[in-house]
Image: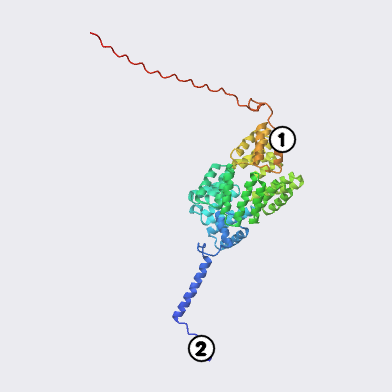
Amino acid sequence: MDRIDEESQQPAPPVTFTGRKTLVAAAVAVVLIAGALLIRPARTGDDARPPGPSERAASAVGRGAPVAAVDLTALVAGREKWVAAHPRDHASWAVLGAAYLEQGRRTADSGWFPKAEKALKRSLEARPAEKGNFDAMTGMGTLANARRDFGTGKKWGELLRAQAPERWTAYPVLVDAYTGLGDYKAAQAAMDRLLELQTGLVAYTKASQVYRDRGWREDAVMAMEHAAGAAKAPAEKAHALFRLGELSFERGDAALALTQYEAALRTDPGQAQALGGRARALAGLGRGGEAVRDYRMALGRTPVPQLALELGELLEALGRGQEARVPYDMLGALAARDGSNGVDDDVVLGLYEADHGDPAAAVRRLSQEWSRHKSVQVADALGWALHKSGDDVAALEYAKKATEQGLRSADFAYHRAMIERGLGDESAARRHLEEALRTNPRFSPLRAPRAKEMLTVIGQPAAGGPENVLPTKPWVAPELPKPNPPKPKPPAVPPAAKPTPTPASD
């Protein structure tokens, strides 16, 4: 025991020159490894660690997919800190711009859009578009479409496609831009190319959008179901369920739509769009009190003019006109906020003015909008404003543009029916009222009851008319003459035998 204590008290051997070199090399190796861990780029496929919130959000915004609120907050905070120290990092500025844009979309707060534009422009300053800054170009096109500036969105999308035709992120920008401009053939061509290059949530969502605009409901639902299957995170799954709810409600199945909206909210409680959808479905099912509650909660989370208009009209339908003034006033304030941030709300404002304000002002507003964007939504709104201002002849031309592209909309059919009735064409009005109620009998708490009432006023066609149009007696098949039996053929006569020549006598 004493021997061991003596050995333990012996001084340590001096570090030789060779030993010092070993220690220095080890210290350098530790520093290099630590540095590599700190600045390591994107994780490789064999990395077993799960991605963190910032990484998940960066991956999603890079694909143009929805992002969970907590992940998005982490991404924004991390990139803001990074670019403050590295102002020439064009890639990080582009990611930050896309994150700001997603914040604006998720919260329906257009105040994020100027911040997104500033970040994307900083990225383009550090690396211009002509040098291939594709992420910033994609962000600028997506931002323009979010502001409903579809002409600018088209320019960015086409520039990106020209520089990198195989880069799939150009085509969602082009689908949205062409759709907003009313060029539905170009939108479908862009969608077809997108599906050739990429499949997944974003591609299937754009395909569903194009199919819906063409009136191909079953294809739209199938594409959206594929999108739900391709979702990689709860926020993505919830967004797909919300879109399925929208498709169900548009075709008149409010009960199924309610189920899908509620599934979206269970999947991602922060999916405020689904809360507005649930309010719409509840109103369609006659549960007005619950619908008012949900509309108010939705407006508290995602204050958008469309929801304010829907709540005001629901309150009017419930006989609560005084209360309706609150969401109508909110609509104006929200539109003013959006306008200051570069967002175009002219369609919803025009519809509000046509029905609840100044139809002449609606015509002026929507005529300017038509000069920029010739979509079916603008055509329908302008036609309705012209009708409300008393010009049914001009209104019918725009109503035809809205209803003859393929989109099956109960609101569009109702607007056209009322315009045709104003022109005295009751037969066409009846046909389009029936189409509206067949498409979605619960399309509006105000207009759906009016459509049913109008059908009873118009009634059935008067008796008479051209012969065989409204026959007075049931049709009976006439007795046709029976064909004559074929005549029997005469028996065949054998040919006469040739006479035998008689020999001449001497």
Name the residue rendered at 48%, 54% in the picture.
131
What is the quadrant of residue 99 in the picture? bottom right
Is disc 1 placed on a helix, strand or loop? helix
* Drawn side of residue 442 relative to residue 139, left or right: right
Measuring from the top left, give residue 442's x and y in whole percent: 68, 43
Q: CA distance from mark 1 to mark 2?
A: 111 Å
| Front residue of 22 and 417 | 417
Which residue lies under the disc numbered 1? 456
Measuring from the top left, give residue 55's x and y in whole percent: 56, 61
The image's mark for residue 7 is 2
Mark 2 belongs to which amino acid?
A: Glu
Disc number lying in front (1 or 2): 1
Relative to 228, say whether 184 is above or below.
above
| Front residue of 194 and 379 | 194
Name the residue rendered at 75%, 48% in the picture.
323
Tell me whether circle 1 and circle 2 mark residues in contact (CB < 8 Å).
no
**Which quarter of the image is occupied by the C terminus?**
top left
Relative to 492, say whether 428 is above or below.
below
Q: Earlier in the sequence, mark 1 or mark 2?
A: 2
Is disc 2 placed on a helix, strand or loop? helix
Please rate how many residues cluster around mark 2, counting C-alpha atoms within 10 Å: few if below 14, some from 14 to 19, many from 20: few
